[in-house]
Amino acid sequence: MKTSLSKKIAVVGAVALASFAINLTPSIAQAAPACAVGPVTSCQGATSDGAPYVMQVPGNFNGTAFLYSHGYRYNVPLPTGFGYPAVVNTPQPGPLVGDAKDTAVIKYLLSHGYAVFGSGFARQGWNADSGVATDVELISTFKTQFPATTHVVAWGESLGGFITQVLAEKHPELISAAAPLCLASPIEAELTMAGDFLWGLKTFFDPSIQGGNYKSVTESMQDLGRVVGLLKALQVSIATGEWPSTTPAPVKAMLGTIPPRSALLLVGLMAGIPTQSDHFDGTTGPGSPNSSAYTNFALAGSPALAVLENGASAAVLGVLATADVELQAGGTIFDNTKTDYAARVESEKAIFSSGLSGATATGGMLAYLAAAPRVSADPVSVAKMRALATIQGKINVPTITMVGVADPITPAGGSQWVANQYAAQYEAAKAAAAKAKQKRPASALASIWGVTPAHYTKFTAAGAPDTSGPRANGTNHCTFTAKQYIGVADLLAASAVKGALPNPQTIKTAARRMGGSIVDAKFQPALPKFFQED
């Protein structure tokens, strides 16, 4: 049965966030692991902070164990229809593939002699500090239970990738290699993207959207409903050209002749939302490639629809993650009082001129944003947010990053930021080696990019976009294939044993064999907007 875009928005967040297990071995809180011995020995228990864990060790254990850190899980129950109605802390020892949560990667590792282990963490939501503490204790517990362990590989996705990177930066003595997959940027960068997008939706389309400063879970859930309702309305608006009924009167008076899709696209661009999404590639239109309908849709319609599809995921996570971190920090953390949104889109406004309806329309929209009321953060709350665990981009062990180039939750630019930070570290290491007349060191970081196909947007016989098919490679959030996970795992295992990454050609070959993946030093995605201003 075909799935309409409106239905997709109604359940947004259910498949776009880092996946987690719901059918693995149930957790049992106890001081020491309880193990069932068999072809694969399975142990379960809880760390001292109450985080349930599971360990799986094959009979032919080769000494290398993979520690997995799962991604962001909501710390409050979501409304019915969002797919995740309950808060769960089920332990997860490895990545799960696709919407069906296939355990193929875990089975592969076990069949090749690798052990796997991971926890459900003691706290859900943004939990980097407690997550790292859990992982540190869990490594010790695993090695005590299985003293034949010679190497620990740390990997994880999204927030779990962030936790993995923090672990590698703070405790490199505990692990031999790391893979922060679809790596979350420092929380301030993540929430700036979400805050800018929510503020743009509020300013152009619905002033009732709160976008932060939540005083209760009820407030955030009510705001979530408003955001999702607006996104559904925008789907209709893009088709009809009529602004949503919630649009402020001054917007209609000043910008009403501009298609609402242009305002949505501008909001996406200024926040840093990708303009390629699950089903919209920005290069394909209906009918003949030589027709005006084809060109108009590819240049004007597709980018806005991509922002809508991507923005749905980003906005939902933005509301809930903002509420989560505000709770920890004590107050408002988003601030755009000094943000120059015109500067934010300076490099994109020519590229997306058709989608933005030309220079005059773009200038009018930016002028409206410049005059709109801004949001001020609470300095004490910002300081508390910045005191939470963060990453520096330092590489202490052989490390592999991998992210889709059109990931709307953890943009590829976040992984590029880590690569940029490491570049200075690597240059210093080379200079030190040259001064000591030693061999030039090999790079300890490899960046793998999940790329999108050149054309993948589909259309019905009537020429309407068809979103019923599977999402394209390189889009959505942490939607890697089993081949991509396994390819990274093989590289990590080799790196752990050798103490260094395989040679660059081996990594490039591995990426090619994964499918939909490249390693290319010349490919450098744009940094998140937060870092472009820094």
Image (spheres, helix red, strand yellow):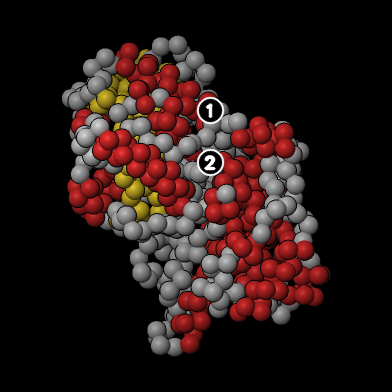
Give the vertical position of 509 relative to 93 (above or below). Answer: below
Q: Is residue 391 left or right of residue 179?
A: right
Q: Is residue 43 left or right of residue 367?
A: left
Location of residue 407 in the rendering, given as x and y in whole percent from the top left corner: 46, 54
Question: Which badge, 2 or 1, comes first in the chain's sequence?
Answer: 1
In the drawing, what numbered circle is on residue 186?
A: 2
* Number of marks drawn: 2
Give the vertical position of 182 relative to 436 (above or below). Answer: below
- Which residue is at the front of the view, 512 or 397? 397
Location of residue 293 in the rendering, given as x and y in whole percent from the top left corner: 49, 85
The amino acid type found where label 2 is placed reads: Pro
The amino acid type found where label 1 is placed reads: Asp
Q: Is mark 1 on a helix, strand or loop?
A: helix
The residue depicted at 79 percent of the width and 66 percent of the height is 248
Disc 2 to disc 1, C-alpha distance? 13 Å
Q: In this view, does 26 lie to the left or right of 307?
A: left
On the image, numbered disc 1 is attached to which residue? 129
Location of residue 206 in the rendering, given as x and y in whole percent from the top left corner: 74, 61
Q: In this view, does 397 lie to the left or right of 5?
A: left
